[in-house]
Amino acid sequence: MSLIINNLVKRHQNVVAVNKLSFEVQAGEIFALLGPNGAGKSSLVKMLVGFSSPNSGSIELTDDGHTYTSIPAHLLGYLPEDRGLYPEKTLKQNLQFFAALHGVKDSEFTQRCAYWLGKFNLTERLNDPLKSLSKGNQQKIQLITAILHKPKWVILDEPFSGLDPINQELVVEFLAQLRKQGMTVILSAHQMAMVEKLADRVLLLNQGESVLYGKLSDVLKNAQNNVIHITFKNAITPQSISKLSETYCIEHMHAHQLAITVTEQQPLNQLLSQLLTIGEVCEFKNQAQSLHAIYLHAVAEHNAQRVQGTTL
Ligand SMILES: Nc1ncnc2c1ncn2[C@@H]1O[C@H](COP(=O)(O)OP(=O)(O)OP(=O)(O)O)[C@@H](O)[C@H]1O
């Protein structure tokens, strides 16, 4: 079972929302779809679930000897961008309704409902009207409706939005549970700290294009190797590092500190000898970059490349 996307393009009038995207989602993984507002995530998700058709390229899902051009409804659990439950009905009625739509038997419903409500600390609220719950708690019920039928594929659009840090952690646990139960999860999210905790693979989109794609562990490892953090004994100034910035990409500079991106072609001893001409070096280390920092850097670089491309 795998999902293979090849050269996918989606245009909305004159906007290219998804531009020649190719990637793969493997069974049983948590796949994070990242990108700034307007990057094309929702346009992509809509094609994955069959709500809209690509202009070109292909989506190929193979499962149990069948091949599909989108994730079929009977294999899918979906938390859409626009939430929608029945506020006047109780939690139980809401959950029962969605479970019945997916053909979940009564006995299974009772057991799964108790399990997930327990996980989200909502057991006592089973017979309360949904509207009496806080927005965050309503969101948790919406999450449960998406997976109560144990789908093989789960797509969650912004599962962390509107949740406080404690509830965000509960959603992290919830997602880890889904993976444990063998579901494949595609989630779109803006909370990099949460994504960093649990994603197996990430795809970062910007202006419809892929700017970063791969196993999260590789993405973090590659970034860690490339950025050197240096602390000088005395304060540095833009003038004192001007020569250095001709050769190296300066990530940031602050009082006594400097962070520099080095490529594989730039030997560290050469960097060190240049640094010593600036001042006494107290510390020189590779420091792990957060996914948040990697994201900002990759998007900024891609934007700069696009501007350069249009001005050349
Ligand atoms: N139905 C539509 N008609 C015209 N343009 C659209 C339509 N849907 C999306 N777009 C445009 O396509 C681009 C990608 O939008 P999309 O909603 O896919 O991004 P997104 O990454 O999901 O953004 P967000 O994080 O804000 O939800 C944007 O420029 C958007 O304005």
Image (cartoon, rainbow, N blue to C red):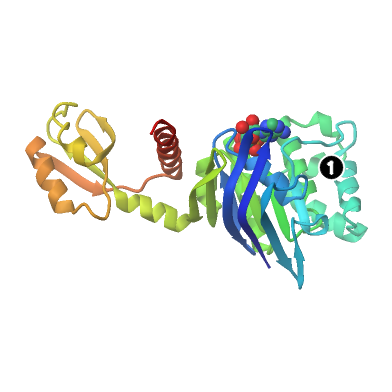
Label 1 Cα neighbours within 10 Å, binned few <14 / some 14-19 / many ≥20: some
Q: Nearer the viewer, residue 307 or 199?
A: 307
Q: Residue 299: which quarter of the image? A: top left
Q: Taking the image as four quarters, which one is ligand 1 found in?
A: top right
Residue 229 x %, y %: 25, 42
Residue 170, picture quadrant: top right
Residue type, label 1: Leu
Q: What is the quadrant of the N terminus in the image?
A: bottom right
Q: How many marks?
A: 1
Provide the secondary structure element on which disc 1 rests: loop
Residue 114 in the figure: left or right of residue 158: right
Query: What is the residue that sits farthest to the bottom in this orientation?
Result: 65
Q: Say whether residue 22 is left or right of residue 106.
A: left
Pinpoint residue 73: horizontal percent, then vertical percent.
Answer: 82, 54
- Please, is residue 256 above or below residue 276 in the view? above
Q: Position of residue 116 (x, y in %)?
A: 75, 51
Q: Quadrant of residue 107?
A: bottom right
Depth order, front residue of 37/144: 37
Residue found farthest to the front:
312
Q: Nearer the viewer, residue 210 or 189?
A: 210
Tell me the residue that label 1 is attached to. Answer: 126
Residue 158: in sight, yes or no?
A: no
